[in-house]
Amino acid sequence: MKAAVIEAPGKVTVTTVPDPTPGPREVVVDVAACGLCGTDLHILQGEFAPTLPVVPGHEFAGEVVGLGSEVTELALGDRVAVDPSLYCHECRYCRVGRNNLCDRWQAIGVTVAGGAAEYAVAPVANCVRLPDHVDVQDAALIEPLSCAVRGYDVLNSRLGSHVLIYGSGTMGLMMLELAKRTGAASVDVVDVNPERLATAEKLGCSQVGRSADELRRSGGGWDVVVDATGNAAAIQDGLERVAKAGTFLQFGVSDYATKATISPYRIYNQEITITGSMAVLHSYERAAELFATGVLDPQVFISHRLPLTEYPQALDQFAAGQGRKIVVLP
């Protein structure tokens, strides 16, 4: 089968690899679409994936075309979206329900072969059957949406909060859509990309600006500040925009070397919370249900649909900040 392979840091090719074989409790998925993500760029940079080469792609959906010997929950022809998370279920964090922090954490498309291929293998427990009305090519959006749902689980947002989001790429826009649906009084968005800001306006945010200084916010800051960029300058600025008793959520994925400076006295004196949200935790099925109800408009979120053969070019385009969600179609 054809697959994209990150062979070494900075090197990705589309080549032929052996067809996958499912284990007893696994299925083979004929991949309909696979989304690109910032994590894929980090893998290309030599971060995250413990070993290379690897077939990337942790945001994917498709049709079941192969069943392991012990699979009874799914049938051939079922259309599924795949949660890429792989946990040990044995370490301390798994035992206390924090599986996303698993000491042996793995993920399809990060530590094992993923969906940037014609076919992919997944545990049956990780597959969510799609309703008939959901386009399977659009369902690659469910995985990033599940990360956003996890982000809002961490925030425990209060009704009437004023929210500031840095970044209006896919993840920032998803956080915007969820903020609107969790009772935010206002949702403002900062980005340096005018095309992406235009999309945030289209989706109904309160204000947009190239910097937070352009936004009108009385009362000393925002109750919730979300960084969806991973950019050091955005993070540093965002930390200074949190109102008293507010929360800063580090949601964007930074390079390992990224640093920011905090003011411990201000955190103490103003009871500011600084927290993070890592990947998916008990949120994939809920994201699939939300997606089926139309919480996102795929025509807005997916800006480019490219053939798998153009995966290297798609990564370059994504790295350059062009478009929104880019998906490849095997």
Image (spheres, rainbow, N blue to C red):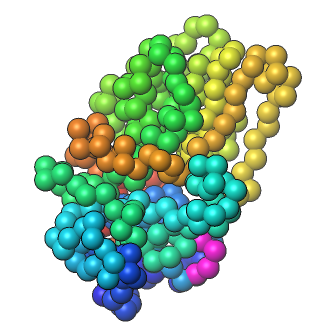
Closest to the observer: 173 or 115?
115
The residue located at (44%, 36%) in the rendering is 175
The furthest residue to the left:
132
Dividing the picture into quadrants, the one containing residue 47 is: bottom right
Dividing the picture into quadrants, the one containing residue 277 is: top right
Q: Which residues are magenta?
A: 48-52
Closest to the observer: 108 or 77?
77
The residue located at (13%, 49%) in the rendering is 133
Task: Relative to 275, say whether 24 is above or below.
Answer: below
Count of all numbered marks drawn on residues in the image: 0
Dividing the picture into quadrants, the one containing residue 247 is: top right
Task: Relative to 319, say whether 205 is above or below.
Answer: above
Closest to the observer: 245 or 125?
125
Judged left or right of residue 219, residue 165 is left
Q: Main secondary structure of the magenta part?
A: loop
Quick one: quadrant of the C terminus?
Answer: bottom left
Judged left or right of residue 23, residue 75 is left
The furthest residue to the top:
219
Residue 237 at what x, y percent from top left? Answer: 67, 31
Residue 110 at what x, y percent from top left? Answer: 52, 69
Quick one: quadrant of the N terminus?
Answer: bottom left
Closest to the observer: 146 or 233?
146
Residue 181 can be seen, yes or no: yes
The residue located at (61%, 35%) in the rendering is 249
Task: Relative to 314, say whether 7 is above or below.
Answer: below
